């Protein structure tokens, strides 16, 4: 009987101890939460990435306006060029291109690419056939003479084959030139031709060598572009 009485107080004591421990734990947790610093105000003060994006977006129009101004300033001049190809009259818009190495600019028709062949010589090549092209060489009039350049062209054309002179009608597109002369060599069997032209304008002596064939027949188009050559 004493054994049973002893067990009941022991159980009561154990229960009291367990409740006390739990109460202590809860109190410590509550105290810890009170002691932890609040991040709410800090988080409110720090700008979010979304706010940063808004600021950036507000600044963007300024750079766009600058780019627009630059684009307008650098807009290339366009000019309508009329030419005949295989007996058909054509009109296309040409865009001004400037030589990377030489002191000239030219109105370039679509379907052609202007590039440097070597120092002092450019190539205006058909995109449809690389064998159809116009070589462009310009010399400052103070560095040479028209007669000297013309003689050089005549020698070259005579080495190519039997030459004949281009008519004034074929060279009618060249306006305001000081001097001009042109030659052509026909290769009937190959249906090809080589044309050489020398003219003086805007203080430049320009020497042209055109290679064309009957399949594309772009001679008139290339001569019309050449007629737009002027000093930068």
Image: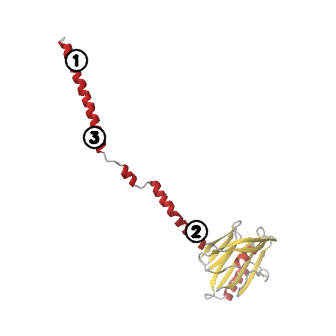
Classify mark 3: residues with Cα within 10 Å, few (<14), some (14-19) or many (20+): few
The mark that comes first in sequence, 2 or 1, is 1
Compared to residue 11, the image places residue 176 above or below, namely below
Q: Position of residue 167 (x, y in %)?
A: 79, 82
The quadrant holding residue 84 is bottom right
Crowding near the residue tagged with mark 2, few <14, some 14–19, many ≥20 C-alpha atoms within 10 Å: few
Front in this rendered view, residue 50 or 155: 50
Q: Nearer the viewer, residue 25 or 179?
A: 25
Q: In what quadrant of the picture does the N terminus appear?
A: top left
- Name which of mark 1 and mark 3 comes first in the sequence: 1
Q: Looking at this view, is 229 or 216 the one in front?
A: 229
Report, in whole angstroms, how far the alpha carbon at label 2 lies from the one at label 1: 93 Å
For residue 68, the mark is: 2
Callout 1: few (<14), some (14-19), or many (20+) C-alpha neighbours within 10 Å? Answer: few
Report the quarter where the C terminus lies: bottom right
Marks 1/3 in contact by CB < 8 Å: the verdict is: no
Residue drawn at the location 76% of the way across and 68% of the way down: 216
Q: Are marks 2 and 1 in contact (CB under 8 Å)?
A: no
Residue hosting label 1: 8
Question: As displayed, is residue 5 above or below residue 137?
Answer: above
From the image, tell me which residue sits under label 3. Answer: 31
The figure's colour scheme reads secondary structure
Percent position of residue 204, x then y:
65, 84
Q: Secondary structure at mark 1?
A: helix
């Amino acid at each position: 009987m004493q054994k049973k009485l002893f067990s009941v107080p022991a159980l009561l004591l154990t229960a009291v101890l367990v409740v006390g421990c739990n109460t202590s734990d809860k109190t410590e947790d509550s105290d810890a939460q009170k002691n932890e610093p609040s991040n709410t105000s800090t988080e409110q003060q720090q700008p979010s990435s979304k706010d940063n994006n808004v600021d950036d977006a507000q600044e963007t129009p300024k750079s766009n306006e600058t780019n627009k101004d630059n684009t307008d300033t650098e807009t290339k001049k366009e000019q309508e060029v009329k030419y005949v190809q295989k007996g058909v009259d054509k009109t296309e818009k040409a865009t001004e291109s400037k030589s990377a190495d030489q002191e000239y600019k030219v109105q370039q028709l679509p379907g052609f690419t202007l590039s440097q062949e070597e120092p002092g010589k450019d190539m205006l090549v058909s995109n449809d056939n690389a064998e159809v092209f116009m070589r462009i060489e310009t010399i400052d009039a103070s560095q040479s003479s028209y007669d000297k350049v013309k003689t050089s062209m005549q020698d070259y054309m005579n080495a190519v084959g039997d030459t004949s002179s281009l008519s004034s009608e074929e060279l009618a597109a060249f306006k305001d030139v000081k001097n001009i002369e042109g030659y052509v060599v026909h290769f009937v069997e190959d249906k090809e031709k080589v044309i050489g032209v020398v003219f003086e304008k805007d203080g430049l002596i320009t020497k042209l060598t055109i290679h064309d064939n009957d399949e594309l027949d772009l001679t008139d188009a290339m001569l019309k572009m050449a007629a737009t050559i002027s000093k930068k």
